[in-house]
Image (tube, grey):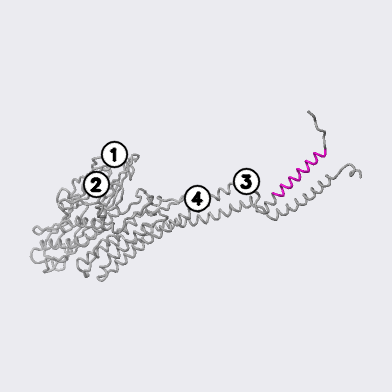
Amino acid sequence: MSIAPFNASTYLGDRNTANLVGLKSRLDTLTNQLSSGKVGTTYGSLGTGRTTSLSAHAALSALDGYDAVITNATTRVTLANASVTQINTLGDGMRRSLTASNSSTIANTPQVARNSLDAAVDALNVDLAGQYIFGGRATDSPPVASTDTILNGDVSKDLAGLKTLIAEQKKADLGAGTGRVSATSTGKTVTISEDDVGASAMEMRANFGFRLLSATSSNRDAIDPNGMTLGTPADVSFKLSQPPKEGDRIRVTLNQADGTQTFVDYTIKATAADDDPTALRPDVAEAELNKRFGADLEKNFGTATVAGIQGPASLGITSAYANGKPTALSFGIKGTPVAGDTVTVSVGMRDGTIQTLTLTARASVDSTSTTEFSLTGDIAANLSGAINNALTSAASTSLAASSASLASQDFFAGSQSAGLAPRRITFDNDEATGYAEAASTKTVIWYTGDDTASDPRATATAQIGANRVLNIGVQANEAPIRKVLAGLAMIAADAGTTAVSGTPEARRFSALADHANTLLVSNNTTGGVPGIASDLGLAASTLSDTKTENRTNRNALQGSLDGVENISAEDVTAQLLQLQTQLQASYQVTSMLSKLNLVNYLS
């Protein structure tokens, strides 16, 4: 092994070469920076600024994702808001049409309602890129049935529509013709009472016909309303022949103090707590139902009383109505009434409306009069007959309109969930016996979207920030929308009339219009259809504000990135000129040194 002799010129040459290569590399870097405007092409070239760059890029990428979500959500909310606004407009338009109807336009009113219902169904079946936004979480098919199916049913599937339900409700409410309230006379006493006939009498009283409320006389010395026996509700108990399964739904109907009916819905859940107001455990469902609507009825529901129950046919639910009695009142003919004396009877209907019947004494009147009674002959018998005439007239007009309203609301409260189909009335020998406890499978289900969410807004969400989720869901079966649809449909289902004003048929349609108007009114900005529009408007505002905020954040992040990744062209140019001077000097020195030898040095 040999050791090469030390050569100083080799060290100096290597060092100069290294310096030149370094300067050349620096020149290449500056040239790239000048052409690209960037500090470098890798995070490593950013030095300590690479952490800032990585964080800023991640934040900008997240903002791009949020903005994409916001754009899609904005489109969805805009479409939903337009549809909800359309529903509100259709309801208001129908209400104005009903108010303005007269004998020359009333015949066309059902067709106007049909056209409005068509438009409402179209608005609720709107889709965004194939997703139907009014179906809640179920977005793959139109959530609302066609108008024809809603009104007329589906013959091919043997499913009844709204017209059938209205006809059944009218028949059940009418009873023998006087709305299940009638008057009789014995001697000088007239007694008015609610029906109390048959094994299902108390169940019928809880659901059908007039409710007897009060009676007054303008001349108590002659006709004295001397007694009223207030009815008492039946004690209702339930029995399930089969234990319910997870997910089964049970609906209990309650009569409220104002005469309206409301529903209490339960879902069978194995994990339900004992006091869960919306769910029942399958092992204690029967006992818990009887407790909540028996001993604890007043504690749970105040003055409400039980009217019925419904669940899947597989449960074999039955209900028993024990005790209870109907309301009755009487008038005593104590003296001699005079012409002009009046008797007033007030009856209530199942949608909460009240009908007042006023009968005026006359010397002699037609025995078919619905507003007067005769003072000639047996006054008690005359008064009793006039009361029955008035009840018959009211049953065929106001009560019939109430029946249509109630049936329409029942129909649109129906759901595809097992147990929550629209209520159907059972008949025996053509006589109504009550509502069926087994949910019908022979009725059109108008809404086939999701109906399991307690909050319709939560059925669709938009992630608009790292910790911000916006609820933007809507469902066609929300209560305010159902009310408008029920109001439109009950008019569309009617045959209309060409009868002149003042006739019974004209009075019937006028009462129908009044009941429909009650459903169509939606000027309540917190609870009606405008309330839904308000929710969507707030969501749209939040989306817009968030997008503006994201734009501001993006500008700030981009500024931070520019400070780290970008480089000034002026600075790079100055560095290039300085480097060029250094390179030229280095090349000259290197060239001179390469020519240096001892002779040149000594000379």
The mark nearer the N terminus, 1 or 4, is: 1
Task: Tell me the quadrant of the picture where the N terminus can be found.
Answer: top right
| First-in-chain label (4 vs 2) | 2
Classified by dominant secondary structure, the portion drawn in magenta counts as helix
Task: Tell me which amino acid carries mark 2.
Answer: Ala
Q: Mark 2 points at which residue?
A: 438
Residue type indicated by callout 4: Gly
Image: 498 above or below 315: below
| 10 Å crowding of disc 3: few (<14), some (14-19), many (20+) | some
Residue at mark 3 to residue at mark 2: CA–CA distance: 70 Å
Residue corresponding to mark 1: 284
Query: On the image, numbered disc 3 is attached to which residue?
Result: 43
Q: How far apart are marks 4 and 2 (CA)?
A: 47 Å
Q: Name the residue under label 4.
A: 465
Q: Who comes first in sequence, dot 1 or dot 2?
A: 1
Instruction: Residue type at mark 3: give it.
Output: Tyr
- SS at mark 4? strand
Quarter holding residue 315: top left
> 282 and 9: which one is in front?
9
Kindly state the secondary structure of the residue where label 2 is placed.
loop
Q: Most extreme residue toward the bottom, as rendered?
A: 104
Position of residue 432 measured from the top left corner of the image (x, y, whole percent): 18, 52
Specify start and end residues of the magenta stretch as a single range. 8-28
Circles 3 and 2: CB atoms closer than 8 Å: no
Q: For mark 1, does the 10 Å Cα neighbourhood hold few (<14), some (14 to 19), or many (20 or more) residues?
A: few
Separation (CA) of disc 3 from disc 1: 65 Å
Q: Where is residue 401 in the image (x, y as percent from the top left)?
A: 24, 61
- Assess whether residue 153 is covered by the magenta stretch: no
